[in-house]
Image (cartoon, rainbow, N blue to C red):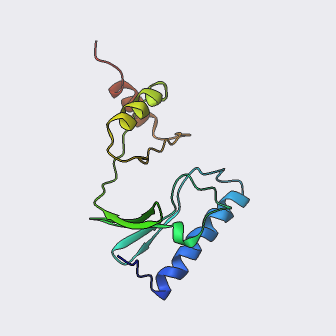
Amino acid sequence: MALKIGKDEAELRRGVVAACRSLSDLGLNRGTSGNVSVRHGKKMLISPTGIPYDELKPADVVRMSLDSTDYVWDGKLNRDAESLLVIKTAPDRREALTAALLRIHPYEVPEVVVLDVAAGNPRYLEWVGAMTRPQA
């Protein structure tokens, strides 16, 4: 399957790369943390996790729709069904959760991204803390 990239999408991919590099230059993102995305019709173009921004190329940007994701793996274009899963847990439980996800996920290199919460609704954060503790 050949990935067909129109002129508009190619420009958006270059824009995603430029935005990633700008965030890094401004000190707002470091290394490979964080993602940049842009909507393109019924799809999203998303910067991949794990590629340093100074090495990122427009072809590395992932195209994702509500029902499938187009990505390059081992030099081949793939299309798979994917769903975004957000799991909330306490900081001291992240390592165990990550290990469990890596053990059970069918992908060779599953995307597991940990985001630190710098601030938020205090009542919500208390609730997350209470819900992620073992029940007595």
Q: Quadrant of the N terminus?
A: bottom left
Q: Position of residue 56 (x, y in %)?
A: 61, 64
Q: Residue furthest bottom?
A: 7
Q: Quadrant of the C terminus?
A: top left
Q: Would residue 98 be seen by someone viewing this image from the given angle?
A: yes
Between 58 and 87, the residue placed more toward the observer is 58
Q: Position of residue 81 (x, y in %)?
A: 28, 60
Q: Quadrant of residue 24?
A: bottom right
Q: Would residue 63 be seen by someone viewing this image from the given angle?
A: no
Is 29 drawn above or below residue 37 in the view shown?
A: above
| Total numbered labels | 0
Q: Residue furthest top?
A: 136
Between 119 and 98, the residue placed more toward the observer is 98
Q: Quadrant of residue 129?
A: top left
Q: Does residue 57 appear left or right of residue 27 in this picture?
A: left
Q: Residue at x 58, y 75 (%)?
A: 14
Is 104 drawn above or below residue 23 in the view shown?
A: above
Q: Quadrant of residue 63?
A: bottom left
Q: Does residue 110 appear left or right of residue 104 in this picture?
A: right
Q: Residue at x 50, y 67 (%)?
A: 61
Q: Residue at x 45, y 40 (%)?
A: 121
Between 119 and 39, the residue placed more toward the observer is 39
Q: Residue at x 52, y 53 (%)?
A: 49
Q: Position of residue 9 (x, y in %)?
A: 47, 80
Is 131 drawn above or below residue 18 in the view shown?
A: above
Q: Position of residue 57 (x, y in %)?
A: 59, 69
